[in-house]
Amino acid sequence: MADDLRHALRRDLERAVRGEVSFDPQSRALTTMDASNYRRVPEAVVAPYDAEDVAAALAVCRSHGVPVVPRGGGTSIAGQATGTGVVLDFTRHMHRIVSLSPEALTARVQPGVVLDDLRRAAAAHGLTFGPDPSTHSRCTLGGMIGNNACGAHSVAWGTTADNVRALECLTYGGEPLRTAGPLRADLRELVDGHLALLRTGYPQQLPRRISGYALDALLPERGRDLARALTGSEGTLAVITEAEVRLVPAPPVRVLVVLGYPDEGAAADAAHGLLPYGPLTVEGMAADLVGGEAAELLPRGGAWLFVEMPGTGEAEALRRLADAGDSVVVTDPVAQRALWRVREEAAGTATRTPGGAEAWPGWEDCAVPPARLGAYLRDFRALLREHGLHGTPYGHFGDGCIHVRIDFDLLGAAGVSRFRRFEDVADLVVAHGGSLSGEHGDGQARAELLPRMYGEELVALFGRFKDALDPAGGLNPGMLVRPAPLDGNLRFAVLPRRPVDVAFGYPQDGGDFSAAVRRCVGVAKCRDTGGGPGEGVMCPSYRATREERHSTRGRARLLHEMLAGEVVTGGWRSPEVADALDLCLSCKGCRTDCPVGVDMATYKAEFLHHHYRRRPRPASHYLMGGLPTWLRAAAPAAGTVNALARVGPLAALAKRTAGVAPERELPLLAEESFVRWWRRQEQPAPGAGATVVLWPDTFTDRFSPEVGRAAVRVLQAAGLRAVLPPGRVCCGLTWVSTGRLDRARRVMRRTVRRMAPVVAAGHPVVVLEPSCAAALRTDLPELLGTGEAAALAGSVRTFAQVLEEAAPGWTPPRLDRAVTGQTHCHQHAVLGDAAERRLRARAGLNGGLASGCCGLAGNFGFERGHYEVSVACAEDRLLPAVRAARPGTAVLADGFSCRTQLAQLAGVRARHLAELLSDGL
């Protein structure tokens, strides 16, 4: 668009719309992609306040001839949530549940309502909304209606179309379109003139027919149901401003029956035979998508059906009657959730083949009649082999709907050509009586092939339906009718063809930063704001701000656009990327919680390294980034430094100079460091127990030496010989977190040299501070890339891990005390806390710890401009958990940042696990 036209469009939108109107590169970059293979660059993003705002935006766009794309959570997998022109973002303001009637079993919602928010509101009345795609924690009702989303429970409650009662919409022409009442005359004439075609042109016995327009819903014998016909139209016919949906009673008891089969074909053959027993869902998955602790809960087999039943008796009956080699009935809700999480995250897990190759959607959700599923899967596997491709099918076996991501090479011309040739699968689906889309819609991925499914005559009728409601073609052009080619607008085409020069090794991505950024496929688990304790860490900054740019996905999208250089043009100096990364806490939560392992903490450090190369940095990068150096210099005068820090004007000056938030208190230095205490002790003679090397991290050494002293006491009580490393060592964490990677490497190389004898001797290295342990485990080997660095990383153990491994026969003191607090985010993301949980249980420390991030996150919460977000992160889970604890409950926090945050915001002294155990000796 020419600059003068863009200026006029912006002027008119800002005058007409009360919501946000954004033409800036950052806002546009955040909406170039959804969860598909496609990318289209919009001119602007508008976040309307209400239906009047939607009408105003449409009027302006119509007057300028600019297309409009409605967008919800942006998790669509076929490209229909991308577009040129103006994107309407309904998640910002139009996310209200207008009303909920338990008596009528209905709710009225705005299009931006997140599904889980509706389900929580309905649960208070014993109700739920039946369709539940795996993105239920972040997808919106408007998006679900646009795609006719389904989810695992459509076996019981049908698709979204089966649960929509009425819609209020606006056409691109500005006309209100309400689905209640008589059908418009032009639509009635269109249908009545083609009754035979509409009655015979759609496949039968197919519960998951999502492709194309549901024009048969307008047949007289089907009640001329316009709401149903609009559902699944992918924003191409009208813009939804409000919807009335059906609610269903939620079963009071749900029991999960897992049935084992030798392979996916056998599981698929059996699935439809389970439907007469009344299951709520029948999901299928093969062994290559199952791992971790959840795998231990599964029965024997190479593939499984996950069958949810509405009661214990029904579940037992099904287990006895099912023709399966092995089975298990799971009644514990925690165990059920662990298994369901594996299934829900498969959309991300499947983006990597077992061999590590990238895999992409495109044929993500074809569906066939359930009785044909086994035969279809065998033919589908044969077609993959014929094209030299690999994929891992899984999904809604009870509905005959299969999800699969395939290892297409979409980076080069030859791979894209193979992607195009694989369209033969459309003929295979049709031969089995199926639908090209069984859940996610056609979008750009499949709409081009609709004539193979429906024939030219019915597809031409789709075009007439579109033209009746959108004659100007202004709503989501290129989707469904007159579609863009399936191999056009691929999001990978704009990325650099040569590897980008970077500091980290990115070993999981072949050293390619572009490949690391491509990991984000847009499923947006990072936008989940409803998780409770135990639900992971990611993404604390998004949970605090609810802004897409502060989500892991949003930051990955901006990095993608930075590499593309079309919308975000500043490269490593890009202010748009710097702004989005500024509120990243480097919690590393996404490294584990993201289904595809996006590691935004590493990407942030990489970006800062390049962004500030050969130019001045913020003061906090020098002061807090070089904390180990400054503290070592200040140690001889710790008492004087502490006294000066208590003088208000001097403390304020110091904070202003160091870039510290004025609201923060400066932590006090220990009068005697841990290392100094150690050196003046008479260490016991070597005993029979193993030698362990106790890492004197900066935070324990200079701020919390009592933690180190407690750890020594416990280790010695367990019969272990604790020693310190030979010489001064540092993990380099503070330099990494501020992007000073050249300095971090120098520090790390020195550490690796000094630790070489310890590592060669096979001694475990015990690190009390989780953030330092995580840096040694991940940042150090990924920055240095040497065998020596990898060996040191492999020797790192947490306090609980070393007690479990090196002193397995030791019995900890029995404390029998309630605990609360938080598992450190780096512990969760990198180290795992299974050993800690077992040790707490053996010591009688009862109670679960909150998940999430404390919000201080090393230097983050101390930096000027971060205080409010830091507090919001703490208020998300940690502070409520501590406030809710009963008197006498011990507050447990192994990280110095977590303990500092609790002290400053709640006035609570939290303890390291070593301290609690030491007290009990």
Image (cartoon, rainbow, N blue to C red):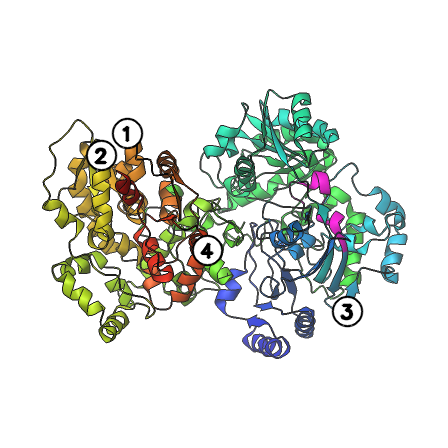
Point out the frontmost of discs 2 and 3: 2
Residue at image mark 1: 810
Q: Give, as a three-letter code, the residue at label 2.
A: Ala
Residue furthest out toward the front: 887
Mark drawn on residue 717? 2
Q: Secondary structure at mark 2?
A: helix
Q: Give, as a three-letter code, the residue at label 3.
A: Glu
* Quadrant holding the N terminus: bottom right
Q: Residues within 10 Å of mark 2 (few under 14, many from 20)?
A: some
Vertical relation: 724 (above or below) 690: below
Which quadrant of the view contains residue 484?
bottom right
Decide: marks 4, 1 in contact (CB < 8 A)? no
The first of marks 3 and 4 along the sequence is: 3
Spatial CA distance of label 3 from label 4 is 48 Å
Foreground pick, 799 / 370? 799
Q: Secondary structure at mark 1?
A: loop
Mark drawn on residue 175? 3
Q: Residues within 10 Å of mark 3 (few under 14, many from 20)?
A: few
Residue at image mark 4: 880
Q: Give, as a three-letter code, the residue at label 4.
A: Pro
Specify the segment rendered in magenta.
150-165
Image spot of residue 667 (x, y percent):
26, 61
Q: How many marks?
A: 4
Q: Secondary structure at mark 4?
A: helix
